[in-house]
Image (spheres, rainbow, N blue to C red):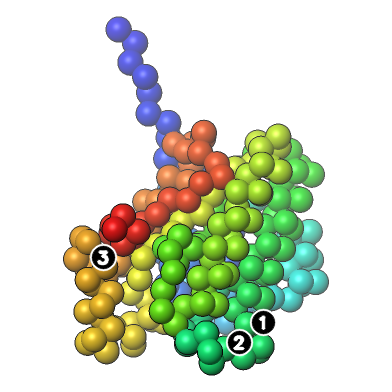
């Protein structure tokens, strides 16, 4: 009997780029891809942080503010096509919708939607030009599937990203380029850790995460590797929700 063979999760010989890669989820994504054999370029605004991260995993650092459209286009135009994009750079300004300013709106939607769109576009254009078939992975959130108090901007931006992702998948399928999102629950990172010092906030979060714990960046590394590799060759236009059961209720 000839048994089916599991597709490889290895990424040897492939090129990957991760935005917002200096810390937290972006750093974990880059580490997962590098461990699987990919040649990884880590992109972030802060040079010392991203350079240290790149050195630790034998990757390469690129200092880039992805909210700068011209710089982003130039970065991808100067690179050989990537096989994998982790479109991770993002921001959040939690507050009641009644207190949101236009500047708040522009900051959150500007990075989480506009910049994410044009990073994906620039990456895809290089892939198409060179005939590279690969995977675009956009870091969304469980808040792209539900609502949340004081999260109008964040929810709106992530719901938008989910919609963009589905359209990307349709536009790029003919080129053999897949597009998917990962939608995590609350993950403990340098950015979010201070919020969990508020006992009431932490308790409210844990009451919704049915597995009973705050997420760690390691919880996302397998999902990232899956979507980057041949193991997900028929997966496109969907969202991999890593939320401990939050959205199941």
Please, is residue 27 above or below residue 107 in the view?
above
* Residue 82 location (% of width, % of height): 65, 50
* Residue 198 location (% of width, % of height): 27, 89
Q: Residue furthest top?
A: 1
Residue at x-position 70% and y-position 34%: 174
- Are circles 3 and 1 on residues that touch, CB within 8 Å? no
Q: Residues within 10 Å of mark 2 (few under 14, many from 20)?
A: some
Please, is residue 171 above or below residue 117 in the view?
above
- Snapshot quadrant of residue 47: bottom right
Closest to the observer: 70 or 153? 153
Q: Is residue 35 left or right of residue 237?
A: left
Image quarter of the N terminus: top left
Cα separation between marks 3 and 1: 30 Å
- Are circles 2 and 3 on residues that touch, CB within 8 Å? no
* Residue 212 location (% of width, % of height): 19, 66
* Residue 179 location (% of width, % of height): 59, 47
Residue at x-position 47% and y-position 38%: 232
Closest to the observer: 210 or 116? 210
Cα separation between marks 1 and 2: 6 Å
Confirm whether residue 35 shows in the render.
no
Q: Is residue 71 left or right of residue 146?
A: right
On the image, numbered disc 3 is attached to which residue? 209
- Are circles 1 and 2 on residues that touch, CB within 8 Å? yes
Label 1: state its secondary structure.
helix
- Snapshot quadrant of residue 131: top right
On the image, numbered disc 2 is attached to which residue? 104
Label disc, if present, on residue 208 of the rendered structure: none
On the image, numbered disc 1 is attached to which residue? 106
């Amino acid at each position: 009997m000839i048994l089916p063979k599991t597709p490889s999760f290895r990424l040897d010989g492939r090129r990957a780029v991760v935005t917002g890669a200096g810390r937290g989820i972006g750093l974990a994504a880059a580490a997962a891809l590098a461990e699987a054999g990919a040649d990884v370029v880590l992109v972030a605004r802060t040079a010392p942080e991203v350079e240290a991260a790149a050195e630790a995993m034998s990757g390469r650092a690129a200092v880039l503010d992805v909210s700068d459209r011209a710089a982003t286009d130039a970065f991808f135009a100067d690179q050989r096509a990537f096989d994998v994009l982790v479109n991770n750079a993002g921001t959040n300004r939690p507050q009641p919708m009644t207190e949101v300013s236009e500047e708040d709106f522009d900051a959150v939607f500007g990075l989480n939607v506009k910049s994410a769109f044009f990073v994906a576009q620039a990456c895809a254009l290089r892939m198409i030009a060179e005939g590279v078939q690969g995977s675009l992975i956009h870091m969304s959130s469980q808040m792209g599937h539900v609502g949340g108090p004081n999260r109008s901007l964040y929810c709106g931006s992530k719901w938008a990203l989910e919609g963009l992702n589905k359209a990307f998948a349709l536009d790029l399928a003919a080129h053999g380029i897949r597009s998917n999102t990962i939608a995590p629950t609350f993950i403990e990172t340098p950015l979010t850790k201070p919020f969990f010092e508020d006992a009431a906030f932490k308790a409210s979060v844990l009451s919704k995460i049915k597995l009973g714990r705050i997420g760690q960046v390691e919880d996302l590394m397998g999902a990232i590797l899956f979507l980057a590799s041949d193991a997900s060759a028929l997966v496109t236009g969907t969202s991999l929700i890593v939320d401990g059961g939050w959205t199941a209720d």
